[in-house]
Amino acid sequence: MFKYSVKLYDWENPRLCSSNAEFVNGDKVIVSSDFGNDLGIIFESAIKTEEDAVNVIVRKATKRDVEVFTENSKKKEEITKACQREIRAENLEMKLIDTHITLGKGNILIIFTADGRVDFRNLVKNLSGMFHRSVRMQQIGSRDEARKLGGCGICGKELCCVRFSGNLPSISTEMAKIQQISHRGSDRISGLCGRLMCCLSYEVYQYRKMMQGMPELYSAIQTGKGKGTVIEINALNQSLKIKMDDGQIITIKKEELK
């Protein structure tokens, strides 16, 4: 696993470059990204098999690479302020999240969020002329923004999107429904990003298994005591609460269903 200022990667084998070099914690490396080469730091390593390798690391970083990265970092504040100024001048409906300068040709990466499409052609033109560098725009979602900014969830722990690397899982309302918490309302099952909480995906597989063979909530069913309507389902102890046609409320196990 290695990290750098824009993205976090996870892998099982530290032999990732063409020279089959091995890396240890703390090694500085040059990594390949969608926007150019950048500086990375190994902070956790494990060796498994060659099949686990992902060609992301280009080579070990040199002293000059580190110097260039440091120089670029010093320019970041200037670029950020200029970008904010140009966004206001162009009256663009976008929120600046971060700026970054890659190694090599030193492309400027502008990371932002927006509710819809943004015409940032003039912004790119102005910044390119100002800093004499190629400018790339990267629009991210609210969950990626939360990962970038960090924070704590309602559980009191660090946000899941920050703690766990890799791609963010897709969270659906079906996950909340099958765990019987969708009735709580979107405010109570949404994270700081405003989207459904990542932790809804942690136990959904187990709930799907436990809910197999269970009737739908509020559906009419036949029991050994007659007909009734399901008013509550307890997946953990495999029981159902039934309101019988005569008004009586009973609790039965799943295996008692006909």
Image (cartoon, rainbow, N blue to C red):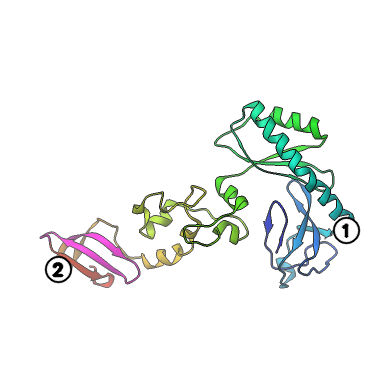
Residue bearing the label numbered 1: 62
- State yes or no: residue 235 in magenta: yes
Location of the N terminus by quadrant is: bottom right
How many C-alpha atoms fall within 10 Å of the one at disc 1: few (<14), some, or many (≥20)? few
How many C-alpha atoms fall within 10 Å of the one at disc 2: few (<14), some, or many (≥20)? few
Question: For the image shown, how many numbered marks are present on the structure?
Answer: 2
Q: On residue 194, which mark appears? A: none
Amino acid, disc 2: Lys
Lateral position of residue 23 relative to residue 234, left or right: right
Locate residue 42, reporting x and y percent. 75, 64
Amino acid, disc 1: Thr
Q: Secondary structure at mark 1?
A: loop
Q: Name the residue: 62% across, 30% down.
A: 92
Q: Secondary structure at mark 2?
A: loop
Q: Name the residue: 68% across, 59% down.
A: 9
Overall secondary structure of the magenta section: strand
Lateral position of residue 178 relative to residue 49, left or right: left
- Vertical placement of residue 109 versus 223, above or below: above
Q: Give how far apart the Cα atoms at labels 1 and 2 are.
A: 78 Å
- Vertical placement of residue 24 versus 34, above or below: below
Locate residue 32, reporting x and y percent. 77, 53
Q: Which residues are magenta?
A: 228-247
Lateral position of residue 81 relative to residue 217, left or right: right
Locate residue 113, reporting x and y percent. 60, 40
Furthest residue in direction left, as rendered: 246
